[in-house]
Image (spheres, rainbow, N blue to C red):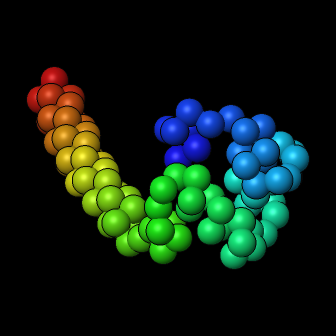
Amino acid sequence: MRIEHGFTTTQMGEYLNITQSAYSKLERGQSKLDIDRLNRIAEIFSLPPHEFFSSEKTCNCMHELSELKKLIQLLIKELRSGTETTLRKKKVN
């Protein structure tokens, strides 16, 4: 989200009154985010704080995973079909 809005980690640190390094740790999950900082980040992105916990993002990921699973199943089916064709050709020869 930060990158999509064109913010650097330095800028985000400044907005939150913390160092760039401290902000980077928050972003990487190496440091815990308190409610005050969460609210400030929500303000920066003009979002209500609960949007960070929206199931829409989860739903999008689940949809993408479902589509990926379908593609993998099709590839496996095609690979098996190709292998069977190759084996039949070898038996004939």
Instruction: Please name the residue shown 47% across and 61% down the image.
Output: 47
The count of marks equals 0
Q: Is residue 36 above or below residue 5?
A: below
Q: Nearer the viewer, residue 57 or 69?
A: 57
Residue farthest to the left, as pictured: 92
Q: Is residue 58 visible?
A: yes
Instruction: Please name the residue shown 78% across and 47% down the image.
Output: 13
Position of the C terminus, as image quadrant, is top left
Whether residue 68 sits left or right of residue 43 in the image: it is left
Q: Is residue 85 above or below residue 50?
A: above
Q: Is residue 85 above or below residue 29?
A: above
Residue 34 lies, in percent from the top left, at 75, 73
Q: Nearer the viewer, residue 23 or 61?
A: 23
Residue 85 lies, in percent from the top left, at 15, 35
Q: Nearer the viewer, residue 72 or 67?
A: 67
Residue 79 lies, in percent from the top left, at 25, 40
Picture quadrant of residue 90: top left
Picture quadrant of residue 88: top left
